[in-house]
Image (cartoon, helix red, strand yellow):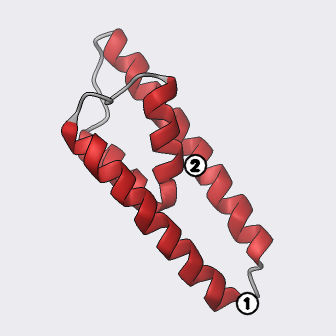
Amino acid sequence: MEIGYESLAIGILVWNLITFLIMGLDKRKAIKQRRRISESTLLALAFLLGAPGVLIAMFVFRHKTKKPLFLVLVPLALIENVLLVVGLKDLIL
């Protein structure tokens, strides 16, 4: 079975929607002082092709925007995501 570029794009879009929602959930948990999602998990989601969703959520929800680790690693994850997608695209086409 061959996976096309459109399928890859849709999968990445859905995944980033999920990462966006997870960041929103963590922000909600922070406000309600409930058990949180670990920072390492949130960063792992970013490096696993979810950086756009995490980055957008950081600013939409104003969440983790003062954490130096996130301010450095999420943009690096975005660069890594782009390089991975370009590499995957070349493999598919």
Give amino acid for label 2: Asn
Q: In the rendering, at what x and y percent does residue 12 appear?
A: 63, 59
User: Relative to 51, does residue 21 appear above or below in the rendering?
Assistant: above
Measure how far apart labels 2 and 1 are at the Cα level. Answer: 23 Å
Residue farthest along the top direction in this orientation: 32
Q: Is residue 58 rendered to the left or right of residue 66?
A: right
- Give the quarter of the image for residue 90: bottom right
Q: In the rendering, at what x and y percent does residue 88 appear?
A: 59, 81
Q: Earlier in the sequence, mark 2 or mark 1?
A: 2
Q: In the rendering, at what x and y percent does residue 29 appear?
A: 37, 19
Q: Which mark is residue 34?
A: none
The residue that appears at 39% across and 27% down in the rendered structure is: 26
To which residue does mark 1 refer? 93
Depth check, front residue: 26 or 61: 61
To which residue does mark 2 refer? 16
Residue farthest along the left direction in this orientation: 68
Q: Nearer the viewer, mark 2 or mark 1?
A: 1
Q: Which element type, helix, strand or loop, lies under badge 2?
A: helix
Look at the image and tell me in which quarter the N terminus lies: bottom right
Mark 2 burial class by Cα count in 10 Å: few <14, some 14-19, many 20+ = many
Depth check, front residue: 32 or 24: 24
Look at the image and tell me in which quarter the C terminus lies: bottom right
Question: Do the residues bearing badges 2 and 1 touch, measured as CB atoms within 8 Å?
Answer: no
Q: Which element type, helix, strand or loop, lies under badge 1?
A: loop
Count how many numbered circles sit on residues in the image: 2
Mark 1 burial class by Cα count in 10 Å: few <14, some 14-19, many 20+ = few
Give amino acid for label 1: Leu
